[in-house]
Amino acid sequence: MVLCKIEILAFAVLVFYIPIAHSWGIDGHLIVCKLAQARLSEAAEDAVSQLLPAYAENDLGSLCSWADRVKFRYHWSSPLHYLNTPDNLCNYQYNRDCKDEDGIQDRCVAGAINNYTTQLLSYRDTSSTYNLTEALLFLSHFMGDIHQPLHVGFTSDKGANTIDVHWYKRKTNLHHVWDNSIIETAEETFYNTEVDELISALDKNITTVWSHQAKAWEACRKTSCPDVYASEGIKAACDWAYKGVEEDSVLGDDYFLSRRPVVNLRLAQGGVRLAATLNRIFG
Ligand SMILES: *[C@@H]1O[C@H](CO)[C@@H](O)[C@H](O)[C@H]1NC(C)=O
Ligand SMILES: *[C@@H]1O[C@H](CO)[C@@H](O)[C@H](O)[C@H]1NC(C)=O
Ligand SMILES: *[C@@H]1O[C@H](CO)[C@@H](O)[C@H](O)[C@H]1NC(C)=O
């Protein structure tokens, strides 16, 4: 009977959980972590390789979706992947918006970035009791999430999870379009279905067309600046993600081609900022 319950639970998880996953898809997170790891200082590269479990073989990208996989085991962590802002206001304020559904302050993606940044700052403190492997994996994941515009979406539609749309011919929801579909369609259309080719293209743009802007993306007077990233996020959500979309909209070439540059920009910013934050933490 016990086994049977576990099987039913596993089934329920597969059927009901994955379709509303609150996160860039696996590729989005992989992209952010790969872009970041290539930009680490020697001190940060060293700390990251110490903190990663051996089976990751020093590849931060391979564990960048770990935080999604532990959402059930660490149920407390699921509100830390996103934040919701008041409907249609198109702005963000930490004190007003960074809380979970029970109204508990700091329990949102911006609060979690502050939390795990602070924990990692104790890296050289031998009396630290934090699990800094987990802190690194959470921070790396949440830095990706906060750059997904609909992880900083409206409250009543749960970051557009409740807005059903068609992506070309397929039924999905608007949140999923931004987590996965735009990236997947871009990979299929422009990069031979190879995530590595998209990563190389982003990497190249960071050092060429975006090189000046990338300096500004890194800038932060504290160790990390999640409030800046969240404010940009809700603005991008209003200007691009929600714009022109209604329940049952059919999103095709026009939407894909006009929004693809926004997704590319947010992935690049996420990677550059994760690296800059880790470099400040371990520098
Ligand atoms: C901070 O990190 C600890 C350890 O993982 C966790 O228990 C707590 O819920 C986190 N709080 C926030 C706001 O991230
Ligand atoms: C830290 O967290 C990782 C990942 O959850 C786990 O495998 C490891 O055993 C933890 N380390 C300690 C000392 O608890
Ligand atoms: C890189 O920049 C070029 C020139 O602006 C642009 O056409 C291309 O789409 C960009 N690629 C990515 C992945 O950002």
Image (spheres, rainbow, N blue to C red):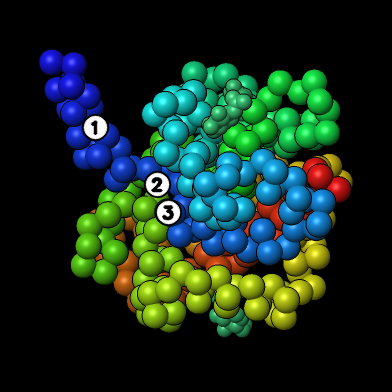
Q: Position of residue 180 (x, y in %)?
A: 39, 58
Q: Quadrant of residue 126?
A: top right
Toward the viewer: 267 or 128? Answer: 128
Q: Position of residue 279 (x, y in %)?
A: 79, 51
Residue 235 seen? no
Q: Residue 10, which numbered label?
A: 1
Q: Amino acid at mark 3?
A: Gly
Q: Amino acid at mark 2?
A: Ala
Nearest-to-viewer mark from 2 and 1 = 1
Q: Amino acid at mark 1?
A: Ala
Taking the image as four quarters, which one is ligand 1 found in? top right
Count of numbered badges drawn on the protein:
3
Q: What's the residue at 18%, 22% (across, down)?
A: 3
Toward the viewer: 13 or 226? Answer: 13
Question: Which badge, 1 or 3, comes first in the chain's sequence?
Answer: 1
Residue 84 seen? yes
Distance of mark 3 from mark 2, alpha carbons?
Answer: 15 Å
Disc 2 crowd rating (10 Å Cα; few below 14, some 14-19, many 20+) is many
Toward the viewer: 3 or 18? Answer: 3
Disc 3 crowd rating (10 Å Cα; few below 14, some 14-19, many 20+) is many
Asked whether disc 1 touches disc 3, contact meaning CB atoms under 8 Å apart, the reply is no
Q: What's the residue at 31%, 43% (across, down)?
A: 18
Q: Position of residue 12 (x, y in %)?
A: 22, 32
Nearest-to-viewer mark from 1 and 3 = 1
Q: Position of residue 152 (x, y in %)?
A: 54, 44
Nearest-to-viewer mark from 3 and 2 = 3
Distance of mark 2 from mark 1, alpha carbons?
Answer: 26 Å
Question: Which badge, 3 or 2, comes first in the chain's sequence?
Answer: 3
Q: Which residue is mark 3?
A: 25
Classify mark 2: helix, strand or loop. Answer: loop
Q: Which residue is mark 2?
A: 160
Q: What's the residue at 21%, 67% (across, down)?
A: 169
